Amino acid sequence: MKITTVNLPKSYIRALQILKDLGIYTSKSEAIRVAVRDMLHRENSGTATVNPGEHGVLDEKMNVAIDDLEMISQSKKTITSILDQINAEMEA
């Protein structure tokens, strides 16, 4: 593989980090590779659905998705903390 520098909005970087933290991807690079692969597949198959003028709409949807991912991430941390407490109590 070759290294390529990409400039992304902070919200995208935050979403990629959340996906990594949730274990959906092993790294932000992997998530980006999957996204690029899927985009190229859609473009090649003629099923691309994004029109050039829709970036504002996509950014808004991305922000909603980021909020959802942050909530899921926080819920996962809470559940993990509760399970740790239960395990500690069971061992005591």
Image (spheres, helix red, strand yellow):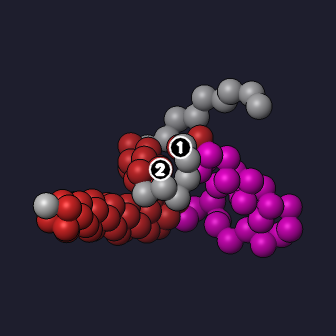
Going 67% across and 47% down the picture, which residue do you hit? 33
Tell me if residue 67 can be seen.
Answer: no
Q: Is residue 89 left or right of residue 87?
A: left
Q: Which mark is residue 28?
A: 1
Q: Position of residue 48 (x, y in %)?
A: 73, 68
Q: Position of residue 16 (x, y in %)?
A: 47, 50
Tell me if residue 6 can be seen.
Answer: yes
Q: Is residue 54 left or right of residue 40?
A: left
> Hey, what amino acid is under mark 2?
Lys
The residue lying toward the viewer, choosing from 77 and 70, is 77
Location of residue 50 by image quarter: bottom right
SS at circle 2: helix
Q: Which residues are magenta?
A: 30-54
Magenta stretch holds residue 46: yes
CB atoms at circles 1 and 2 under 8 Å apart? yes
The residue lying toward the viewer, choosing from 27 and 78, is 78
Q: Which mark is residue 20?
A: 2
SS assignment for the magenta stretch, majority: helix
Going 44% across and 62% down the picture, which residue do you hit? 62
Q: Residue furthest right?
A: 45
Q: Earlier in the sequence, mark 1 or mark 2?
A: 2
Q: Is residue 43 left or right of residue 78?
A: right
Q: Position of residue 67 (x, y in %)?
A: 32, 64
Magenta stretch holds residue 47: yes
> Hey, what amino acid is under mark 1?
Lys
